[in-house]
Image (tube, coloured by chain):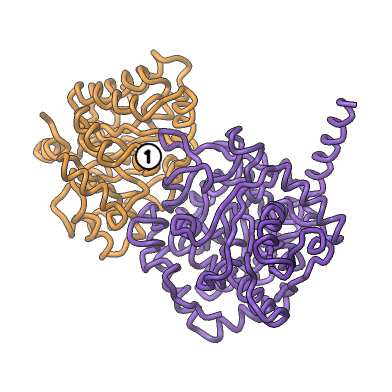
Chain colours: A orange, B purple
Amino acid sequence: MTTTATAFARAKAEGRAALVGYLPAGFPDLDGSIEALKVMVEHGCDVIEIGLPYTDPVMDGPIIQAAAQQALDNGTRTKQVLQAVEAVAKAGAPTLVMTYWGPIERYGVEQFAADLANAGGAGLITPDITPDFGQEWIAAADAHDLDKVFLVAPSSTPARIAMTTAASRGFVYATGVMGVTGGKQATGDIVRPLIERTKATTDLPVGVGVGVSTGAQAAQFAQYADGVIVGSAFVRTLLEAPDRATGLRNLAALTEELAAGVRGRG
Amino acid sequence: MTKQPSTWDADEFGWFGGTGAWGGRFMPEALVAALDELTVAYAEAMADPEFVGAFESALVDYANVPSPLYEAKHLSEQYGVQILLKREDLNHTGAHKIRNVLGQALLTKRMGKTRVIAETGAGQHGVASATAAAYFGLDCTVYMGKVDTERQALNVARMELLGAKVVPVESGSATLKDAINEALRDWVASVDHTAYLFGTAAGPHPFPSMVRDFTRGIGDEARAQCLAKYGRLPDAIAACVGGGSNAIGLFTAFLDDADTAIYGYEAAGDGIETGRHAATIAAGGSGVLHGARTYVLQDEDGQTIESHSISAGLDYPGVGPQHAWLADSGRATYEGVTDAEAMAAFQLLARTEGIIPAIESSHALAGALRLAPKLAAEKGKDAILLVNLSGRGDKDMGTALDYFELASSKKGETK
C-alpha cells in the first residue's frame, strides 16, 4: 500500500516534488467529489487531501468557502466524508482529511481516528490546531498509525518550527503566504526561507501550500520543497465550469499542468 | 488595576479549570506568534504603572468612568428587595465596551502597531473600536455581517463618521460569527502591523483573560460602591451573557465572595424549546469555536448552528470560556431569558425609573426580577440585588418600535 511517506519517497527517488491535491468532500455533491478526486489521482496527484466542510473555515478564502458551503447545503455529513476517503483511497493515492477541529471534537477524537483508519485514510491535516493544543489528536493518531500533518508559517519562530516538525508524521505543511487560501500568490522570497528553516529541523518531507495554483509556481517551488499542495485552483476549476464533464476535463488538464510543474517542466 | 491571581484564572496556556477543560488556543500556526507576542506585551503592560495609569486616565477623563451605582427605588419597592443598577449605560459610547477597546487600543499603540480591526454584531463594539481608534490615532476596519449592516444602518454611519472603514461580510450566515471569521482572515494576512480588538471575553488565549481584565473595573467599582453605601456586599449579582464581556467584567471582583450569588442570563430568544435562541450554556454542548473550547450551539456533526435573539449583542452561538468554567464549577448560575421577558423589562425600566436600557441589559434585568421574589422570601427587603445595566437603549429604538407595534397589532387582531 502506498503511504504518504512512500508517495513522497517515490517522488524524491524520481528527482521531483510530490503533487498534493485538495477538494472538499460533498462538492459539487458526494459522488461528484469522489469522481473529481479520482480524476486528480489518475492525472498525477501523488497524495490527496479531502476537505471536511465546516461552517467557520477561518483559514479559507472565498473559493473554498463557497465550495464548503455548497457541500453543507447538500447535507454533507462527517460520515460521508469518511465514505469519500474510502472510495478515493481505493483509487491508490494516500488520502488525508483536512479539517478544522470543531467537527472532530464533536465526533469524538478517538472514534474519528478509528473510523478514519478503517476507511483507509492516511491521517489528518489540521489547520487550526497546533501540536501544543493537539495532545488528544496526537495520542489517537499514534494509536491508529495515522499521519499528523501540522502547519508551519512564515511567522513561526525557530522553536515553534522545531516543536511542530517533532510532532508531525507524513509530511510538514508549510504555508506559502501569510493569508488565507485562494488569495495572494506565494512567492519564492517567502517560501524558500520557510522551507529551509523547516527542513533544518526534520527529515520529514516538507510541502508548500496556500497561494500555489500554477504549473510555473510548482516548478519553482519544486526546486526546494518536497511537495506542492494545491486546493483553491482545483476548486475554482470545478466552480467555473459550465457543466460537470467540462469541469472534469479542465481538472485533468490542471492536474497535468501541475504534475509537469513538480517535474520541473512548469 | 493589578490582576489578582485566583483559582478562577486561566493557566499560562489559557486553560480555565485545568488543562484541556475550557479555553485554550485552537488557532492557525500563522497567528500563534502574534498571540504569543500579545500575551507577553499585555502582561508587561499590566505590570507597568505608566500603562495602567494611562488606561485609568482614559477611562476617567474620556469614558466617564466610574459609572454610578444607582438604587432603583421604584423597582425596589415593587419587588421587595434593594435593586441596584450599575450604570454602564452612562459611559461614553453608551456601554461597557468602551473599557475594553480603550485598553486594547492603548496596548496596540504600546506595541507599535498602526491599524486595528474589529468584528461587530449590532455595531456597539464596532462603534467603540472606531471611537478608540479615533482617540488614539489608529486606522480602523470593522467587519460586520451584511444582515447586521442593514439592521443597524445608523451604527454603520456612526463608525464611518468616526473614520472607520466598515466591511459588510456576506459569507456563511452574514452575522456576528461570520464577521469574526472574516476579521481572523484579515488578521492572518495583516498581523505584522495590525491588532485585532476582539469584542468579547471569548476567542483564543489571551483574549478571554485580557478582555476580562480590561472590563473588570465594572465589578471592582460596583463592589466598592456597594460596600461604601450599604456597608456590605450584594446578596446576588446579575448580568446578561452573549460572549460574556460585561458579565465577566462584573463577576470577577465577586468570585471569592462566597455569600454573593452570581447569575448570568443568556438570550432564550423565542424559547429554548423552539430551537430559536442563543442560550449557549443552558442548551449547547462542549465544542470548539473561534479558538476556544467552550459551550457552543452546534449540530450533531459539530457544525455551528445560527443563534437567534432580539438582541444583536447576545446573538452569538458561543460564549467566553471562563463562563463555561464558572458554570461547570457551579460558581455561577446561567439561565435563559426570552425575547418577551426581556422586552417587558425594557419597557418596565423605562416607565418606572426613566431609564431606557439596551435590550441586552434588559435580559439581565428580566432575569434579576425573576430572582427577586425568591431573594425577598429568603432574605427580606434589605437583600441587595445588583444588576449590570451594561448599555443604553438608544440603538434599540427601531427594534422596540417594531416589537411593540407588532405586539399591539396582535392584540388588535384578538379583539
Determine which quarter of the picture holds residue A232: top left
Q: Is residue B252 left or right of residue A95?
A: right
Q: Is residue B232 visible?
A: yes
Check disc 1 and report the residue beneath it: A106
Q: Which quadrant would the C terminus of chain A be assigned to in this image?
A: top left
Give the residue drawn at x 60%, y 68%: B215
Q: Position of residue B376 (x, y in %)?
A: 70, 62
Q: In this view, does B287 lie to the left or right of A263?
A: right
Q: Where is residue B61 in the image (x, y as percent from the top left)?
A: 72, 79
Q: Which quadrant would the N terminus of chain A be assigned to in this image?
A: top left
Chain for mark 1? A
Q: Residue B234 or A77: which is nearer the viewer?
A: B234
Q: Which amino acid does label 1 sit on?
A: Arg
Element assignment for label 1: helix
Determine which quarter of the picture holds residue B102: bottom right
The answer to whether B87 is drawn above or below residue B310 in the figure is below
Q: Residue B109 or B35: which is nearer the viewer?
A: B35
Q: Is residue B184 left or right of residue B137?
A: left
Q: Where is residue A169 in the image (x, y as percent from the top left)?
A: 18, 46
Give the residue drawn at x 71%, y 66%: B380
